[in-house]
Image (tube, grey):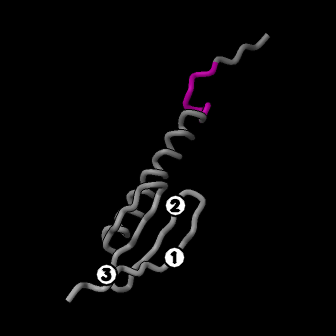
């Protein structure tokens, strides 16, 4: 007997990726362009946390670069 084919259901059609879930194989299908990742729900949940943390750190880094209070500024008075 062959296993039943995977039938993922679309959860999100995003601008950069598509997210599907198969209730038969219990896997999340994350499609980014030509790349598809098949992740368990636990791995997907951890991946989402890692992506959010990485994005938050990037935003903090960008704001620190643009934060002029951290840069020495000399005020000249005449």
The residue depicted at 36 percent of the width and 68 percent of the height is: 44
Residue 33 image position (x, y, % from top left): 49, 55
Quarter of the image that includes the N terminus: bottom left
Residue 63 image position (x, y, % from top left): 57, 40
Q: Quote the CA–CA distance across marks 1 and 3.
A: 15 Å
**Residue ID for mark 3:** 25
Ranked by sequence position, the earlier of labels 1 and 3 is 1
**Residue ID for mark 2:** 17
The residue depicted at 58 percent of the width and 64 percent of the height is: 14
Q: Taking 62 as reference, is 29 above or below it?
A: below
Left or right for 76, reference 52: right
Residue 73 image position (x, y, % from top left): 62, 21
Identify the mark at residue 11; answer none if there is no mark. 1
Q: Which of 58 and 64 is in front in this view?
A: 58
The residue depicted at 55 percent of the width and 33 percent of the height is: 65
Are dots 2 and 1 in contact, CB under 8 Å? Answer: no
Ranked by sequence position, the earlier of labels 2 and 1 is 1
Residue 49, located in which quarter of the rendered image? Answer: bottom left
Q: Taking 4 as reference, is 39 above or below it?
A: above
Q: Quote the CA–CA distance across marks 2 and 1.
A: 11 Å
Which residues, given as a range, are shown in magenta?
67-73
**Callout 3 crowding tier (Cα within 10 Å): few <14, some 14–19, many ≥20:** some
């Amino acid at each position: 007997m062959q296993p039943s084919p995977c039938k993922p259901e679309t959860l999100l059609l995003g601008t950069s990726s598509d997210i599907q879930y198969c209730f038969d194989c219990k896997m999340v299908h994350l499609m980014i362009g030509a790349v598809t990742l098949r992740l368990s729900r636990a791995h997907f949940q951890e991946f989402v946390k890692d992506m959010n943390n990485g994005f938050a750190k990037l935003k903090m880094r960008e704001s620190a670069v643009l934060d002029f209070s951290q840069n020495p500024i000399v005020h000249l008075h005449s």
